[in-house]
Image (cartoon, rainbow, N blue to C red):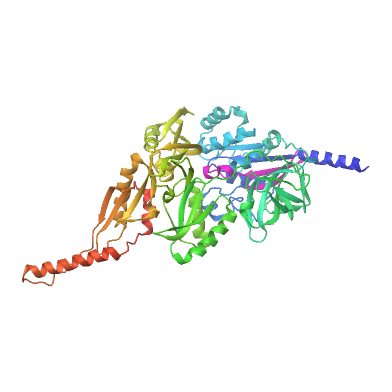
Amino acid sequence: MQKQSGVSFLVVILQAMKNIRNFCIIAHIDHGKSTLADRLLQMTNTISVRDFQDQALDNMDLERERGITIKSHAIQMEYEQDGENYILNLIDTPGHVDFSYEVSRSIAACEGALLIVDATQGIEAQTISNLYLALEHDLTIIPVLNKMDLDSAMPEEVADQIIDLIGCDLEEIIPASGKTGFGVDKILEAIVAKVPPPTGNPDAPLQALIFDSVYNSFRGVIAYFRIFNGKISQGDLVKFMATKKEYDADEVGVLKMRQVPKKTIYAGDVGYIISGIKDAREVKVGDTITHITGGTTQPIQGFENVKPMVFAGIYPVENDDFEELRNAMEKLQLNDASLTFEPESSAALGFGFRCGFLGMLHMEIVQERLEREFEMTVITTVPNVSYWAHTKKGEKLIVNNPSDLPGPNVLDFIEEPYIKAQIITKSEYIGTIMSLCMDKRGQIKNQVYLSTDRVELTFEMPLSEIVFDFYDRLKTISRGYASFDYYPIGYRESDLVKLDILLNGDQVDALSALIHRANSYEFGKKICEKLRKLIPRQQYDIAIQAGIGAKIIARETVKALRKDVTAKCYGGDITRKRKLLEKQKKGKKRMRQIGNVEVPQSAFMAVLKLDD
């Protein structure tokens, strides 16, 4: 009898799994993803009128202001169709390239994806890269043409682009408007009809994929996961396979507008687990959760540690604020596990941290959050990337900071990271974009016309060349029409040199840079000219020099403020004037030996805008 009831319970679970739909939304920035998600929440009565606000899933002020999703979110919706009740799990994803690893894990937790394309702008670079990720995971794609209510919409032209891209029929593309709610009912019907229900065995050993985590100051780290096999109950002893950490599942549940605790959740479900974890580094996106006893030995494929791509030093403006900055960074890391940092010191800036970021936007967001959430005003040094230095003894050393580079007597060669860049633009801007990429040591690999006036350019170029001002210049020369996306393709040998900046013979380590030998003279000349304008004048001359090793390649001088010491000499012998001038000369020489040159904060960021 016991066995009979166990079988019937399994049948109930399998029946419930047939009515679950797990899907995500993929789109370029500003194509209306968050607005359309708002309409889905309203249409399924997941959010009440009283609680509703625009970008309901974006809970940071910064996300609302910039109109971008920084953290991915998950939410469960209940939907009724033809007398059947369905559970729709929407796993929202960030659209920006800097958060592409989060996107890939969110996609791995789904069976379907809404491909949202702005009817006024057409297909953009990040749409394509996220679509490729979805196709790699065999997701069912539902194309949606958004912003149909705008007068500038071009439905026929953009529909042709979608058909060329994914090979669907015109009838399969759903016209919609996130703003007015037009077409949202058709999207819900398509999700139920086309997205396959999850597969999995509720009786098998537990296998659950962590696709996100958030930090709660009262309850610790909360991990969001999708169960592929087995079930998880409150009080179970679980293990995170990549970190090999073991925990007690204090609370499990599903994600609606608020967390809803459940006794047990089963295969196919998306949920959360709270187990009193205080250190965000113990929960890694892409890790597999299983039971300590009777758990699986096979982790879900695809886990990798998040690798920082861009490094920069962050220093407090006042040296006394170092401990406060450390506390702020630790709290920020609990919320953003992809931020890495370690203490470092600089002769020019004192004590601070060497931080690793996923990209330039990520760095900007961290800086802004430090100022807003923790009221920390910081100085950020020139961003750079990590290199591999190969010594003559055959050792391979990672170099995150130019000052870590081994000396020329030890160094054999340096490898730098390369990326594959995809740029989608109007055909009239091809020439200027090509010359920009060539200036940045890029090599064109492919050129594909998506329509008569839209072209996709593929380049291979060093990551260090896009760290400075590449994106701003791309937007300027294309009048905002070009969209840009990239992904790393490995390391290649390059002729790089360490460029030092010296003020009165003293090296300013925070302004050092690793740069390609061909660009070093021009870069050194520009930075010296820029610093001459920014460093305030003193009572003595300040020599600004750019050097490679012992060789000086550029020099500028900040002229001294002149005091007329001979003004009081009316007539008389010339030797009196000479005596006063000699005395002044000696004083200036002594002053230069003991005087400190104050480098203003603007000088450290000026390097990023050398072409202004």
Number of labelled discs?
A: 0
Magenta stretch: dominant SS?
strand
User: Image quarter for residue 534?
Assistant: bottom left
Please tell me which residue lies in front, 505 or 175. 505
Measured along the vertical axis of the image, is residue 235 above or below residue 476? below
Camera-side residue of 412 and 249: 412
For residue 116, side relative to residue 199 (left or right): left
99 part of magenta stretch: yes
Residue 67 at x, y = what percent?
53, 49
The residue at 69%/35% (across/down) is 195
Q: Is residue 29 visible?
A: no
- In the image, is 420 to the left or to the right of 513? right
Q: How far from the left and from the top, in percent, is residue 21?
A: 70, 39
Q: Is residue 261 visible?
A: yes
Residue 221 lies, in percent from the top left, at 65, 55
Q: Out of 183 and 572, give the one closest to the viewer.
A: 572
Q: Is residue 59 left or right of residue 76?
A: left
Q: Nearer the viewer, residue 575 or 361?
A: 575
325, above or below 497, in the image:
below
Residue 604: image location, x then y, percent: 38, 54
Pick out the residue farthest to the right: 1
The residue lying furthest to the front in this view is 393
Specify whether residue 593 is painted magenta. no
What is the magenta range?
73-101
What is the quadrant of the N terminus in the image?
Answer: top right
The residue drawn where x is 51% and y is 38% is 487
**Residue that protrudes farthest toward the left in the picture:** 572
